[in-house]
Amino acid sequence: MDPITTLTLRAPDDWHVHLRDGPMLKAVVWHTIKQFRRALVMPNLTPPVLTADDVHAYRAEIQDATFPTFEPLMTIKITDRTTPEIVRAAREAGAVAGKLYPEGVTTNSEDGVRSFWDLRPVFCAMRDCGMILSLHAETPGVFVMDREANFLHQYVSPLAVSLPGLRIVVEHATSAAAVRLVDEHPNVGCTITPHHLYLTLDDVVGGALNPHAFCKPIAKTHRDRDELVKAAISGHPRIFLGTDSAPHVIVKKECASGCAGVFCAPVALETVAEVFDRHSVLHRMEHFVAEAGAKFYGLPLNTGQITLRRETWRVPEDLQGVRPFMAGKELAWKSRSL
Ligand code: DOR
Ligand code: ZN
């Protein structure tokens, strides 16, 4: 049988992206809006997006740098100082999720949460106003390869059971344990990034150190990566694409104390298509990139379509001073702009 040469999908959503602000926002946002109708925008700016006022201001900045056809879905950062009143006001301002970073686990999380369980009133308020709890699921101080599984066990499972009305997303799942946990709890979903469908720890430190494959949570074992691929292509109702595209200028990656983050937006759909193609399940890609997330968030499905063609192209080494995922490599699919 001839291979499929074009793939037309419902316009997709990115359920986790770092668009940044200022000049970096202007430099990178095109790569997101050319292929995603909506994107859940992370709040870890300096200063962070904490309140309804911050939501209004950051949304305005994004809208100023994009077209009205693109809808930024706003988040606030949940810290130890977040209150139920702050949650309700942010929800009124249109924030759809609250993003919780435990203290110090990744970029700009120095103000992250130290007392998870003290936030129960905040979690209840989120449940009551229909705001999603979006989790960077890693326990600080635990061995880096075990941080995600530890957080799931210590915090996510008990929370999901005790507040069944709260919808929780385990962001950028990197382990078999995360996939298992989603399966066990009907109120828990997870995002999976394009790069975690490819990378293992070997790609980061197995040969020469590769800072461009360094992100948080760190890519894990071959078994974990394979379970993520299986989950992404499975058609699971609560597993969806969140790119976690996280641009840092090359000098901040190739240095001592390099920043965590993979800039995958420029190749997001193409790299995902390659994975689905390899497993002969291209017909299930639409569910992963354009349906499951919207349904979990309770938002309407997008109208409009995007087309990908089977066409070999080489990924640039450098885009506005940022090195994209798969830089210099050939990809087999190319997406048209929305
Ligand atoms: O690798 C990462 N980079 N993980 C995160 O959680 C944050 C992100 C960033 O903002 O650079
Ligand atoms: Zn992120």
Image (tube, rainbow, N blue to C red):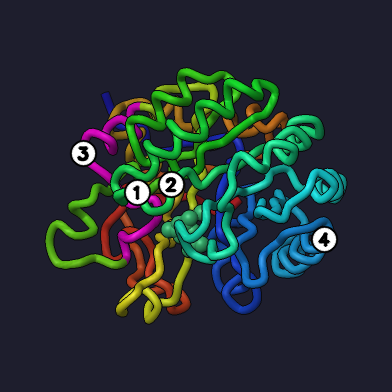
Q: Determine which residue is flagged by label 3.
A: 222
Under mark 2, the amino acid is Thr
Q: x, y (%) of residue 116?
A: 59, 43
* Distance from the alpha carbon under mark 1 to that under mark 3: 21 Å
Label pair 1/3, CB-CB below 8 angstroms: no
Residue 56, label in figure: 4
Mark 2, mark 3: which one is toward the viewer?
2
- Seen at 27% across and 49% down, the residue is 199
- Seen at 43% across and 47% down, the residue is 139
Residue 139, label in figure: 2
Splitting the image into 4 quarters, where does residue 215 fall? bottom left
Mark 1 / mark 3, whichever is N-terminal: 1
In the figure, 74 relative to 151: above or below? below
Tell whether position 219 is magenta.
Answer: yes
Secondary structure at numbered mark 3: helix
* Distance from the alpha carbon under mark 4 to that under mark 1: 36 Å
Under mark 4, the amino acid is His
Which residue is more in the foreground, 188 or 8? 188
In the figure, 145 relative to 49: above or below? above
* Distance from the alpha carbon under mark 2 to that under mark 3: 22 Å
Q: How many marks?
A: 4
Residue 265, label in figure: none
Mark 2 / mark 3, whichever is N-terminal: 2
State which region is magenta. Answer: 212-230
Q: Is mark 3 within 8 Å of ligand 1?
A: no
Secondary structure at numbered mark 2: loop
Secondary structure at numbered mark 1: loop
Q: Is mark 2 within 8 Å of ligand 1?
A: no
Q: x, y (%) of residue 232?
A: 41, 31
Under mark 3, the amino acid is His
In the figure, 294 relative to 76: above or below? above
Relative to 43, 264 lies left or right? left
